[in-house]
Amino acid sequence: MKQEFNFRPKGVCPRMFHFTIEDGRIVDFSAEGGCNGNLKGIGALITGMPVDQVIERLNGIQCGFKTTSCPDQIAAALKEHTSE
């Protein structure tokens, strides 16, 4: 079953993340705002990966002195979505 959802990240530059998940795997990811090249690269790397593996790998990554990062917020979005 294909699921599409949006997530407004907190504490980072992007305004919105857009996800499509099918059969427990990420099939599409995009972001509005933020570092365009980096977020496209992250999207290319996580596409096709199981959601649980993405959460495990990205959770807790920090950006400089911030307590979060774009990858950490992607993990937060996926955790929130899977807990619903």
Image (spheres, rainbow, N blue to C red):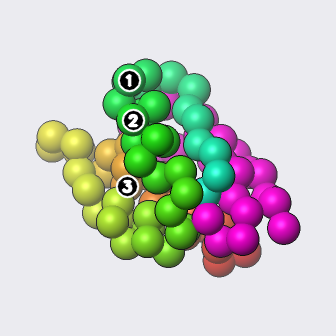
Range shown magenta: 1-25
78 or 28, nearer to the observer: 28
Which of the marked residues, 2 or 3, is nearer the chain's N terminus?
2
The percent coordinates of residue 66 (x first, y second) are 23, 44
Q: Residues within 10 Å of mark 2 (few under 14, many from 20)?
A: few
The percent coordinates of residue 61 (x first, y second) are 26, 56
The answer to whether marks 2 and 1 mark residues whose Cβ atoms lie closer than 8 Å is yes
Residue 63 falls left or right of residue 36: left
Callout 3 secondary element: helix
From the image, tell me which residue sits under label 3. Answer: 72
- When the figure is inspected, residue 16 is found, relative to residue 34, above or below; the finding is below
Distance from label 2 to label 1 (Cα)? 6 Å
Q: Residue furthest front?
A: 48
Distance from label 3 to label 1 (Cα)? 17 Å
The percent coordinates of residue 24 (x first, y second) are 65, 71
Callout 2 secondary element: helix
- Which image quadrant is residue 80 in? bottom right
Q: Residue at x 61, y 65 (%)?
A: 25
- As shown in the figure, which amino acid type bears the numbered disc 3? Asp
Q: Is residue 61 magenta?
A: no
From the image, tell me which residue sits under label 2. Answer: 41
From the image, tell me which residue sits under label 1. Answer: 37
